Structure formats: structure tokens, C-alpha cells
Image: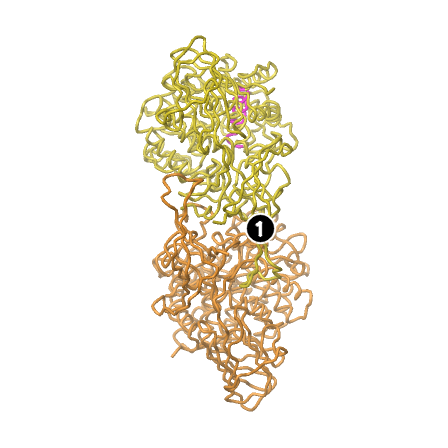
Chain colours: A yellow, B orange
Amino acid sequence: MKAQHSAPVPPGIRKVTIQDSFWSDYIQLVRNVVVPYQWEVLNDRVAEAEPSHAIRNFKIAAGLEKGDFYGMVFQDSDVAKWLEAVAYLLESEPDSELESLADTVVELIARAQQPDGYVNTYFTIKEKDQRWSNLAECHELYCAGHLIEAAVAYSNATGKRTILDVACRFADYIGNVFGDEPGKLNGYDGHQEIELALVKLYHATGRQTYLELSRYFLNQRGAKPNFYNEQWEERGRTVHFPELQMSHDLEYSQSHLPVKQQEHAVGHAVRLVYMCTAMADIAAETGDEELLAACRRLWSSIVSKRMYLTGAIGSMAHGESFTQDYDLPSDTAYAETCASIGLIFFAQRMLQIEPSSVYANVMERALYNTVVSGMSRDGKQFFYVNPLEVYPPVLGKNKNYDHVQPRRQGWFGCACCPPNIARLLASLGQYVYTVKDETIYAHLYIGGIAQFELDSGTVTLEQRSDYAWDGAASFHVHVPRVSAFTLALRIPDWSGGIKHLRVNGSEYLYDAKEVEKGYIRLDRVWATGDTVEVSFEMPVLRMQGHPLIRQTAGKVALQRGPFVYCLEEADNGGQLYQLTLAAGSELAVSFDEELLGGMQVIKAQGERRSSAPWQEELYRPDAQWIQEKTELTFIPYYAWANREPGEMTVWTNHSS
Amino acid sequence: MKAQHSAPVPPGIRKVTIQDSFWSDYIQLVRNVVVPYQWEVLNDRVAEAEPSHAIRNFKIAAGLEKGDFYGMVFQDSDVAKWLEAVAYLLESEPDSELESLADTVVELIARAQQPDGYVNTYFTIKEKDQRWSNLAECHELYCAGHLIEAAVAYSNATGKRTILDVACRFADYIGNVFGDEPGKLNGYDGHQEIELALVKLYHATGRQTYLELSRYFLNQRGAKPNFYNEQWEERGRTVHFPELQMSHDLEYSQSHLPVKQQEHAVGHAVRLVYMCTAMADIAAETGDEELLAACRRLWSSIVSKRMYLTGAIGSMAHGESFTQDYDLPSDTAYAETCASIGLIFFAQRMLQIEPSSVYANVMERALYNTVVSGMSRDGKQFFYVNPLEVYPPVLGKNKNYDHVQPRRQGWFGCACCPPNIARLLASLGQYVYTVKDETIYAHLYIGGIAQFELDSGTVTLEQRSDYAWDGAASFHVHVPRVSAFTLALRIPDWSGGIKHLRVNGSEYLYDAKEVEKGYIRLDRVWATGDTVEVSFEMPVLRMQGHPLIRQTAGKVALQRGPFVYCLEEADNGGQLYQLTLAAGSELAVSFDEELLGGMQVIKAQGERRSSAPWQEELYRPDAQWIQEKTELTFIPYYAWANREPGEMTVWTNHSS
């Protein structure tokens, strides 16, 4: 019996509880391992982790202890993300011990709040007089945004108002500091986050001013003359992160153009997708078509030109940034876990505006590959960077790979990704469905119970899923009285077709007209006990890259269902670049129960290119190569680096 | 009629004058374009070049002008390298105007010399009290070394002693500052150069102390505790180049181990090969077998594991450094022109110790590919970095390529490479022959006249060469009386065999015993009028990389004679990664007189992989690829980037 988890949800949905053969394990890890471990780290009680000092910073700022600030300028956000994850866990399953622990954190944050409403331990302890003097670099509004997100989640989960009041007072104060009016700062944060958080605060409180403030920050972005340049001059040209020119490399923070004019996904990948999430939020709230058009353009720039097969984004380490259309190096990729999480946020917002499987397909791709890859099978180690190819002998030697790790790491200083994974998984129910125009859209096939509030009344859907490995799910309807609505089921982009679609046990022969934007629309009058069973053909796909991606030319990557596969040295030996998958070779799928908790692996006949004795020469004109037959074993990408460190590659040579 | 050039030469050789169908043009460029242009730059009279200030620094240091130092801490070396190149030009062909210009530079340097013998404009003008306080970073002995090299060359060429006296006074002063004795500094320079220069000064003056000082610097290198760490502490932990940890990253400057214990080519590539050159010099002078063994190990590490097909070295931009065995990325290579020049120095020294074609083959490879590639066909633009693959759309976007230029650049701030090319080409005669045990070794087939001093008397050899394109050369002997000696002719590593070997017009059937270490030894009694004609089979080779080089797996590079070839977009269209050279295709060689001064090109049938209409998707499982036949045109690598900027690749996909 898998544990149950629920989470706050998009409009039209009351509650979604996850109970899934694939995902419940991960969510339990968040509850039982990640969140408790993170608490110890935040309190500097984990010997092997870099000291966080995050809780102590709050104690000092609250006047409860003496000491200096320590950590990154955005260290506060670790506490906020922890609290947000806890909130989602509490919402799905009460836990009085965890809740009283969280209450002490809430109390601490409240005491660290300054009389004017300001909350930020760095500027309270370390640079008292420098509030808002370096928006480009110092993350004050970013930290505010995470505090607000946590506050909304925690008050939703517990009904307690203390932290929400803290957040509102802070947001009110921010509204007094920033704006067009004389005497106010005409600025916006270097790292987008406050914008999407203020929309959540608007939803939680109904106060229009928060929505307006979010819109203000978005509209202000990219205005000329540039605010960061001006602040840089005003403060005497000091910088906080000298290795990045944050006040001048405006593309880095997407401040090079007004957001509505932006065409290409550029700069720091996490910032871009957080910004796009807020843009979609504001477009949804205001009906701003120009803003929505910009969302669509940026979405398209990301997913049609600048995204990895694994749903990862960010092609280079410098600036954790996008580079150029079709520049998708496998080995030097940055591909940050947080960026894929942000891409999921963006997709979820777009799905609320205009349900289309183009968004949900990408959401699934990012979730089942990069996000899950981000955490080890024991929940204790994390990838920040998710390369698609690793060659360990050169790591530490060739500096182009300095950001790449061959194994997941424990918690460290800039701990953005682990708590981001925790809060995403703890709130996974938010991403399964959306509702629009009396239609329930099932975007993800993740088991659990969802309650909807339609105009026609309450609907409860129980989804049972064997989707991850078998492509099958079923929906069981509970309605207080018969009810007309549409259940729209996503047809995944990887499916070779619908294998079965049964309504109440009978094969349902759907009409092409019933398929819209990638969803089969089942428009019926439903009664309790109605069932829908769907299963998809799940062929192993030989995925290939666009002709303009030079890094994937002549290569294929296997994908089956939502999972992208990879070759690892543990199964295939080293020198993976000498392996070739033959064009016609059979791709045999089998479930390996022993492997890392059980997973489907793909075996195929391949060839290993090896040389006859080569001697010492580095180059030869007369090399004799032997193609030796060998069995290739592919495992899902998310499971890589859970055994001995070794080579890994997603893209494999392919004979044509 | 090609102009004649001579140069100072290794022991046993009096003079070598170059008159060659391929090289004379380049040497003329040095005389007519590079050296005059460089003079203008050094005097800040070239509008489009970054100000050099190098001559002005000397004027200020000499008290002739007022002002501040400007430029790199090693700016003085640009003046020295210019003077050295001028010396070689004067040696081969008197030029009173050039000589009197050079005399004014000598005079200026002499006036900038401090009363104690010290010469360095940075520490004379800018940091008066900081002499020798930062050996790791500040290049004082490096600049001294270049001054000494220039002095030796200029006094050899002109017979004038002024600059040699300056150099000796400086070297004497250095000998008083550095050493094991109490009160002396126990250090050595971060950038090796003084070591090889002091050996030259020893040869020029016969003073043993210079040889001992060179040996001291070499032996001191890598001693524990580390000298750079100690100086860093002593000067209060200040650094000059904060982006590189020169005082702590000891591999960077090969200071991690005593030189005799070093096994692998690590760190800054230029520094390593300059160091190895001096190690070989000292080994030759002292018979130190341990040092010679280290030379052989480091040579082998470079050429068997860490060298590009083009004779380039340095796999990454960070630190302009070596990385790891078999890590030879084509696109992010640093492959600095200066490093290949240093590799040629090293090879030349090893050839004097133990003639073997393993050294000369590499010397030729570096010279005909990376070094010539370093200069444009008009002598006005230069490559510092010589990648083996360039994809212009990502340059400026993906920071991993920030060091890569798609076209040669004019002179700029850190102008190490242009004057290094100039001095190498102006002294090319030094690299053609060595003499050992009454054997004249012909390493390079470059036309000209060489005079040798053997025990048996003077020998003059006139070499006529059509080697570059046709693999043929002839030698014409002039001796005052019949003379017994051996002429050893290198059999190039690329040759498919000897096509002809004729002595006095008759085919010479040589015995296998006459071939030793890659040379055919013609041991005869020679008379004036004797001729040797040799020509080599010159097949187009499909070169392949060692099985452990992952970047060349499944690829080939064409080579014919000394030239490595490449594909350029100008001939082949873009997306070069979609092209494949078929395994069996004919490789047709033809001379294109119109192309960039005339060169042999190779045409072959290949295929271009293009997709049927792809739509917008970034990845597809059902891509239909079409292999279209296409003609591939390969040009010599050295000639790339002389037309419209575009893609280039040395390594090409190869169907097997």
C-alpha cells in the first residue's frame, strides 16, 4: 500500500492526493528523508554538509543570538523552500510533530521581520544600510518571493495566518518601496521569483494590489535606461558576484528588452522560466494578449530550439544559461534541475490558459527525466547539473567540465536544487490535472484521488496508474449525482497510438473529432462507478535530433514511454563512444527487479569498435578496426549514477 | 627567383640560407610586412591595433620621456622578440636601414638598463620596490630571457656587442640575486624562458656561469616548500592575475614536481615546451642522463597522448593548458601558435642529442600546419588559437568558445604569437639540419644552401625542393676536396615509401641496414658535383585517432605529405557535421593555382545527410534521412579562414 499525498491545486480542483506505483516512493523520500535531512542541514547539524547557517541567520536577525551572517546572499530562501515543502506534506497528511517544528520556524521568521515589514537576514545583519541598493545581484525580492510562496502554502495547509500576515506585511512594504510614483524605486529583481509569488499571494488573499505589484515588476523589466546600470553607478560600481557581470550582462537576467518584446530564451535558465511562469499568470488574470503571445514565443524558443531531450535547459555553465538555437552539447550542458522544475511551472500555467499536449508533453519529459535524475534513489544526494554525457577521466582535468559531477552530491552551499525538488514532489498533485470550461484535463497519468469543483458539481476521480512502465491508467468516477462534463485524456507524444480505450469495460471507438490539441475528449454524462481505462502503445523510440543540432548528428537516443534511456559504463564497459546501435536491431524490453528498486531496461544488439593492436602512435593512417558484436543495455536516464561512477551517454552512435 | 634567407644554426653548421618554393614567400612576408608592421605597433602608430606602448615603456624607463607604464607585465618581451626577428633577417640579408633602426632599439634598451644591470620597464616604472617579489606571475626572468635571446641573435648577426653587453650585465646581476647561497633568492620564474636563453648566452660568450645559472633554475623548479606559495605569503597574498591561481596551481607552471621527476605534460603548454627545450639543452651540455630521460618521457607524453593531428598542443583555454591523456577536443582546443613553436624548439634540441625521425616528424607537423595557420596569407593577421573545428553560429553565445575566433585577428594586447612566428620563420634555417658524428641529418626538405663544418672539412649542400606539394628534393654537394661523411635523409612518417633515390642520376638501391631511426644514411666519399635526388610516395592518408581519443571516434582526417587537410564552408556549404566521406571513395589531388596563392586540394565523393521536411520538432523518432551524394573539397589546414568566415573541420565523419 503506497502512502497518500495531496497538494494544493489549480483553479477548479479542490485536492489531489497521489498514490502511485512510481511516484509515491519519491514523495515518501521527501517526507522521510529529504525534509528531515534538510532541517538538520539548515541547523548546521550535518557534519559532511557545508554549514548552512540559514536558521542561525534568522535567529541573529531576530535578536535571539549574536553573530554574523554567513552564507549566500540568498541563503534565506533555503528556509522558505523547506517551509513550503513541509506545507505541502502537511496538506496531504497531518503530522503534528512536523507542524509544530514548522510553527517554530514561522515564529522565528516573524521575529526576524523588521518593524517596517522587511524580511531579509543578509541586509538585516550584514549590510544594514544597503537594502535595495543592488537589485541586480542581491536577491532581496527573490527571497521575498520564496517567503511568500511558503506563506501561502503553509496557511493553505494549516489554516494558520501568522506567516501569511508576515508575507502580507512584507509585500505591502515592498509595494511602498517600488513603483512609478515619485520617491519610489523603479526597479525589479535580478532573479525573477517575486512576480509569480505575488500572484499566489493575490489568490490567497484576494488583494488586487499584489497582482498589480507583480504586473508592475514584469512590465518594468527591460525598461530604458537600465535600472541595474543606474544602481551600479549610484553605489560606486561595487559588485557582489564579480565573476558575472550581472549589472551589465542584461540578457543574463532577461532585462535586455521589455518582456513583451522578448523573442528568444536567453540568459540564466531558471530566471527565464520563473519569469515566463509569472508572465503566464498575469496573462491569465488580465487577458493581456500581448503578454500571452510573448509566453508562446518564449515557450517555442525553449522547446523547439533550446531544450535537451531530457527536458533539461541551459546549454552552458557560464551564467547557467541558454546559448544559441540548436546548441545542445551533451557533455558541457548545465541542465540544472531547478530549471526543469521552472519549466514545469511554466507548462502548468500555460495548460491552465490553453490546454494543449505540447505543454504537458514537455512537463512530463522534464519530470520523468531531469527532475527525478536530480535525486539519488535514497533521497540523500542531488544533481544540480544533469549532463547527457559524462566521461569521468577528464573531470577535474579539463576545466570545461568543472560544473559536472559523475555522482550526485550531498547538500552544499548554494542549495537551490534539493529543496526545489522537495517542494515540487510534495506538490506533485498540482501538475496532474487542470480544469477549463467544464473539462477535466488529465495531463499526467499519476495515480491518486482528485476532487474537482465544476459548475455541474463536485467530481471525484480516482486514477490508478501503471503508466510509467506499461502506459496504462484507469479513471474511476464518483459524483454525488449524474453529471455532464468532459474528461480529456492526453495522448502522449511518445505513444505509438492508443492500445485500448474502454469506458465501463467496453472498447470506446472514438471519433477523430473527439481528439483536440492532443487530448481525447470524453464528453458524457457520468455516474458514480463509471470507469475509463486507457492504455498506450509504448514502442521503444529511436529519437533523433533536429538536423541543426550538430551534437546529435548521426546519433539516436532511446525513449520508451516517458523515460529517456542512457548507456552506463556499469552495464556496457567503458569507451561508450566506441559503441554503435545497429539500425535494425531488436530492442528488447524487460523489467529488472533487482536494479535500483526495479525498472525496465532495454537490451539491444550493438557493436563495439575496437582496434587491432595500436602501439604508441596517437594517429595512424592504417588503423584496422574490428566491429565486435556486443549486447547493449540501456537504463532509464533518471537512474544513472546510482552505481559505481563511470561513463554515461544518452546519445548513442547509430548505423544507418 | 626567390629571395634568400639565412639563420644562425646548431653546432656543426655554419650557415643555412633558405630559398624555397613554399617557405620563401612566408619569410619575405616577415621581412616586408610583419616586422615593419610590428615596429609600427610597438610605437603605437597603428590605429586599428590596441596600443602596445612597448617602446614608450622603454623610453620612460630610460628617462627620455615622462609617463606611466602601460600594457601587460611582460610587454617588454614584444620588443625583444622583434629585435630577435630583425637579427635573423639581417643575418640572412644585410639591410642598413633596418639595422640602424634596430641599433636605436639597442641604444634605448641600454639606456633603460638600471645601474645594477636590471632591465624591466614594468618594475622600473610602475612597481619600483617590488622587483622579484612575484616570480610566479610577473615574468621578470621571462622578459630577461627574451632580451638575452635577442641579444645573442643580434650580436651574431651584426658583430655588434652593445646589446650582448647589456644582456651579460643583466645575467650577471640575475646570478647575484638568485642561488642557493645565503641571502640569495631560491626561486625561478613562473614562465620558463630564461633557462633556454642562458644556454644561448653561454654559447655566445663561453661563460660557464650562465650555463650553471640555467641549470640552477631548472633544478630549483618544483622544490619543496614551494617558492611561489612562500612569496605569496611574504607579499601579503596579493595576486597579479586573479583569474588564475598561479601561486597555487603549481601544475600550471610545471612547479608541482622537480623537473626530473615529471612524467606527464601538464599545465600551460608554452611553458612546458620552453622548459623541455632548456632541459634538453642542459642534458646535451652536461650529459645528465636523468634529465635526458625526463625529456624523453615528456616528449612521449606530449606526442603520444596530448597532441593534435596538426602538431598543436593545449586542449583547453583555461590556463592555455594540457588536460588529460587523449582529451583532444577539436572545437574547444586552445592549440596556441606559440606552443607549437615551442614544440619545434624542443624537437630541434632532441634532434641534436639523438637524431630520430620521431622528433623531426613532429617538428614538420607543427610547422606545416599550426605555425603556418597562425598567419594570414598577407602577413597582417594572426591566430593565437588554432582549433580543429569551428562552428561560427555559437561563437560569442556559448562561452566555452570565447577564446575561439573564426578569422585571424590583427595585433592585440598580449601579442605573443605574431612576433614568435616572425622569429621562427626568420630563423627557419636552424631547423633544417643537424650534425652529429660526421653525419649531416636532413630533417626538413626546405630548399636553400647550407654550410657545414665537419671534422673532414667544410661541406656545402644546396637543397632544391618541391617537397611541400610533390615530396621531392635534391641535394647538390660542394666540397673543397673529396670528403667522407654521411648524409642522412629523413623518411617522412606520411610517406608511402621512397619513390626514387638517385645518387648522381643513378637509382640507388639502399640496404635496410642503411635505414636508421627513420633516416636513410648515405655514407660515401663525396665530391663536388655529386647529387642526391629523393622523392617520396605521397598518398592521401585517411588519418585516424587513437582508440582512446573519444573526440575522433569514427572520423578521419586527410593528410597528404606534410599537410593536414580540412573542410571549409566556403567549398562545402554549412553543417559540415552532416557530411560523410565514404570509406572507398577516390581522393583526387589537384593543384588549384587560383586558391590563396596556389595549393593542392583534394576532392572526394562524399555524402550529405539531410532530412526530409522536419517541421518544428526538436526531436523526432521517425526522422527520414536522405544521403545525398556530394563532392567534398578539402584544403590544407594552414590555409583555412582566408575567405569568408564559416565552418571548418579537420575531422570528418567516415563510413566504414
Identify the magenta region: A72-88
Tell me where residue A275 appears, x and y as whole percent.
40, 30
* Residue hosting label 1: A608
Q: Quadrant of residue B206?
A: bottom right
Q: Is residue B562 above or below residue B323?
A: below
- Residue B497: percent from the left, percent from the top? 54, 73
Q: Is residue B531 shown above or below B46?
A: below
Q: Is residue A79 magenta?
A: yes
Residue A390 percent coordinates (x, y)? 56, 44
Viewer-nearest residue: A307 or B131? A307
From the viewer's side, name the closer residue of A224 and A495: A495
Amino acid tagged 1: Arg
From the viewer's perspective, is B400 left or right of B230?
left
Image quadrant where one finds the N terminus of chain A:
top right
Left-right relation of A323 to A54:
left
Residue B581 located left or right of residue B218: left
Closest to the observer, A357 or B398: A357
Residue B70 or residue A611, whichever sits in front: A611
Mark 1: few/some/many CA within 10 Å (<14, 14-19, 20+): many
Snapshot quadrant of residue B443: bottom right
Identify the residue at the far top of this view. A481
Q: Is residue A62 left or right of residue B422?
A: right
Give the main secondary structure of the magenta stretch. Answer: helix
Asked whether residue A165 appears in the rendered view, the answer is: no
Q: Dot 1 falls on which chain? A: A
